[in-house]
């Protein structure tokens, strides 16, 4: 298990700064990826509070881990 994976709770939610600390993309690239389906859809916890399920982020990291870069060069 990688060091980054050890920082993610088994269940629960991660806010955008926590997600971006684990996946090296910019905020605009992240939201573009969400829009096109490359990254998981967020969950609205309140009108101004958006988060992602920890399980979805773990699955994303495991799925993209062996494919190189997460950046715009990866097809965004």
Image: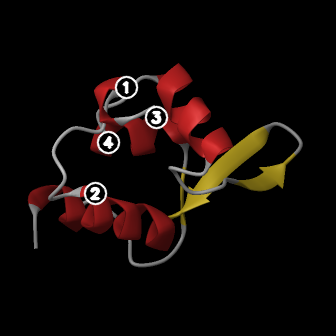
Q: Which residue is mark 1?
A: 72
Give me the residue at 19% from left, 53% from top: 67
Checking the image for residue 23, the label placed there is: 4
Nearer the observer, disc 3 or disc 4? Answer: 4
Q: Are marks 1 and 4 in contact (CB under 8 Å)?
A: no
Above-or-below relation of 22 to 75: below
Q: Residue furthest front?
A: 75
Cα–Cα span, label 3 and label 1: 19 Å
**Is residue 36 depicted above or below 13 in this figure?**
above
In 3D space, how far apart are the residues under numbered discs 1 and 4 (Cα atoms)? 13 Å
Residue 8: x and y, percent? 33, 63
Q: Secondary structure at mark 3?
A: helix
Measured Cα–Cα span from mark 3 to mark 4: 10 Å
Say which label, 1 or 4, has the lower sequence index.
4
The x and y percentages for residue 6 are 20, 66
Residue drawn at x 32%, y 30% as measured from the top left = 71
Secondary structure of residue under mark 4: loop
**Horizontally, is 11 left or right of 20 in the view?**
right
Of the two numbered discs 4 and 2 in the rendering, the one whose residue sits closer to the viewer: 2
Mark 4 to mark 2: distance in Å?
Answer: 10 Å
N-term-proximal mark, 3 vs 4: 3
Identity of the residue drawn at 38% across and 70% down: 59
As drawn, the label of residue 17 is 3
Q: Earlier in the sequence, mark 3 or mark 1?
A: 3
Residue beneath label 2, please? 64
Asked if the residues shown at circle 4 and circle 2 are in contact, with their CB atoms under 8 angstroms apart, the answer is yes
Examine the image and state in which quarter residue 48 appears: top right
**Toward which corner of the image does residue 70 lie, by quadrant?**
top left
């Amino acid at each position: 298990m990688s060091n980054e994976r050890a920082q993610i709770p088994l269940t629960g939610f991660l806010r955008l700064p926590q997600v971006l600390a684990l996946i090296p993309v910019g905020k605009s690239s992240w939201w573009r990826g969400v829009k096109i389906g490359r990254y998981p859809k967020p969950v609205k916890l309140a009108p101004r509070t958006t988060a992602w399920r920890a399980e979805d982020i773990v699955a994303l990291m495991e799925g993209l881990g062996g494919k190189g870069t997460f950046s715009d060069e990866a097809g965004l």
